[in-house]
Amino acid sequence: MRLGRQKTPAKTLVISGASSGLGLALARHYLERGATIAAFARRGELLQTLSAEFPGKVFCYALDVRDSSAIQHAANDFITRVGLPDVVIANAGVSVGTLTEYAEDIDAFQRVMDINVLGIVKTFQPFVAMMRAAKRGTLVGIASVAGFRGLPGASAYSASKAAAISYLESLRVELHGSGVKVVTICPGYIKTPMTAVNRYPMPFILDADEAAQRMIRVIEQQNAFTVIPWQMGIIGRVLKLLPRWIYDSLFARAPHKPRGRAPH
């Protein structure tokens, strides 16, 4: 994919899911570059640890991205203290193995969809109107290659990421010409607690730090849609082009992510 013109690095950001994994890696890299961030995560104690490493640069908000009122309060507080952020990264997400035949998995389906799809909407919502009025800002949604085709045993996760990709495209078109950019990033496998439970090969897996650095470059270039790493983009395109009968035959016996409960 061709890169756009280099943009000025972001100085103020909001990052959800900032207490661990990719979100923490993104937060650290931006903080090391001198940025000020609003860090959203459920585990407030981990956010405080990050804040202690970067005094005066991290505004900690212990919240659940399913709670729109908590996000609205945090957004208002950060804007009052720091101003309208340059970039909002909706990174919070959850992955868990699910099978429709089990009634007890319905709750996991609900949580995955609420966090991975509505969590993006709720994270962006408090900032969109103000960014539009200011004619600036970048909204970044972390989707996944898993949203390209339905993966067996990961039906909730694949569905949520497919929905996220479509939502982000709709939002991008809605904001076209407003000065507000929407960036969709679809990672492949990243070494995080989320992937640590996977019992199958994960091609082209990246460390969280490396993935974060690549994503920051994409965000600065304001690319509308990017797969990281690029090799997974090729795999994703091939899978999308496969006829259904070939895809079904290939993946019917593929290893599944272990079933489990999405975190509360």
Image: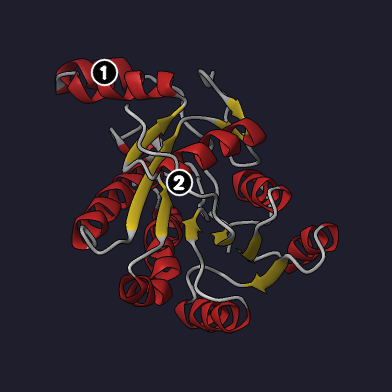
Asked if residue 196 can be seen in this view, the reply is no
Residue indicated by mark 1: 238
Question: Which quadrant holds the N terminus?
Answer: top left
Measured as percent of width and height from the top left, residue 220 is found at 47, 44
Question: Which quadrant holds the C terminus?
Answer: bottom right
On the rendered structure, is 64 left or right of 250? right
Measured as percent of width and height from the top left, residue 149 is found at 28, 32
Residue drawn 30% across and 15% down? 250
Disc 1 crowd, CA 10 A, few/some/many (<14, 14-19, 20+): few
Residue drawn 52% across and 77% down? 75
Residue drawn 50% across and 34% down? 257
Residue indicated by mark 2: 7
Q: Secondary structure at mark 2?
A: loop
Disc 2 crowd, CA 10 A, few/some/many (<14, 14-19, 20+): few
Residue 184's label in the rendered image is none
Query: 155 or 135: which is nearer to us?
Result: 135
Q: Secondary structure at mark 1?
A: helix
Q: Is residue 107 above or below residue 148?
A: below
Q: Is residue 74 above or below residue 188?
A: below
Residue drawn 19% across and 18% down? 242
Q: Earlier in the sequence, mark 2 or mark 1?
A: 2
Measured as percent of width and height from the top left, residue 126 is found at 42, 76
Asked if residue 85 can be seen in this view, the reply is yes
The amino acid at mark 2 is Lys
On the rendered structure, is 260 left or right of 37? left
